[in-house]
Amino acid sequence: MTKTNHLDAWLAEEKTIRALMDAGAGPGVARADQIAGKTGLELMQAMLRGELPYPPIAQTLDFTILEVGPGRALFQGAPGVAHLNPMGTVHGGWFATLLDSALGCAVQTRMAPGQGYTTAELSVNYLRALTPKVSRVRAEGKVIHCGRQLATAEARLIGADGSLYAHATTTCLVFEMPPQATN
């Protein structure tokens, strides 16, 4: 498959997923009653189907989740002018946020009902500059280990031509979510 064919397929997949999520719950934060009793994978799949809201930061930074599976999450982002640093390249924080999202959601897919996680450490290695001339990049996160207290994952940020722009690792703290009070 050529670079153009990859990009065309990426854009078509993004359009389909975004339409589904926007036609459903749209951006926002899920309520406690919406997530109660569900595994992390079930929550992520419900979000992709538009049944649960997706995080508003996805609109702010122009990226979206495309796929999830056990221990895996795939995101796609559009580096734009709004993401540039003073040197005219995409700000490292945009890279980091996209990678952190893929890493965290990969970990989320491994959470049992009532479990949560938070990022304790994020390490990003930047390999090449990114500009809006690259219309899309993908960040794929994969869990390396998920235990009772810690989870680790790795991710890669690639372009449609296969160029590697950055890679990252994370360590997440895993914990039991406090019971939600009902009124």
Image (cartoon, rainbow, N blue to C red):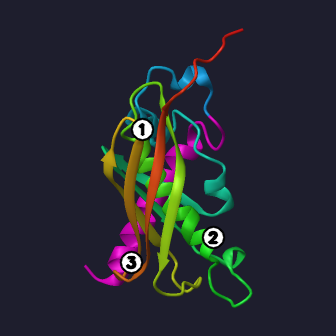
Q: Is residue 132 magenta?
A: no
Q: Residue at x 61, y 55 (%)?
A: 58
Q: Which residue is mark 2?
A: 93
Task: Return the x and y of residue 18 as percentages of the image width and height.
Answer: 52, 52
Query: In the rendered image, which quarter is residue 93 located in?
Result: bottom right
The reply to whether residue 16 is visible in this rendering is no
- In front: 93, or 76? 93
Whichever of callouts 1 and 2 sits on the residue coming sooner in the sequence is 2
Give the CA distance from mark 3 to mark 2.
21 Å
Q: Residue at x 34, y 80 (%)?
A: 162
Q: Residue at x 48, y 43 (%)?
A: 173
Residue type for callout 2: Gly
Q: Which residue is mark 3?
A: 160
Q: Quadrant of the N terminus?
A: bottom left
Give the CA distance from mark 1 to mark 2.
27 Å
Q: Which residue is mark 1?
A: 149
Dominant secondary structure of the magenta stretch?
A: helix
Q: Are marks 3 and 1 in contact (CB under 8 Å)?
A: no
Task: Return the x and y of residue 61 as percentages of the image width and height.
Answer: 64, 63
The reply to whether residue 27 is visible in this rendering is yes
- In front: 109, or 24? 109
Between circles 1 and 2, the one closer to the viewer is: 1
Vertical placement of residue 30 versus 98, above or below: above
Residue type for callout 1: Gln
How packed mark 3 is, by other alpha carbons closer than 10 Å (few <14, some 14-19, many 20 or more), is many
Q: Residue furthest right?
A: 86
Whichever of callouts 3 and 2 sits on the residue coming sooner in the sequence is 2
Residue type for callout 3: Ala
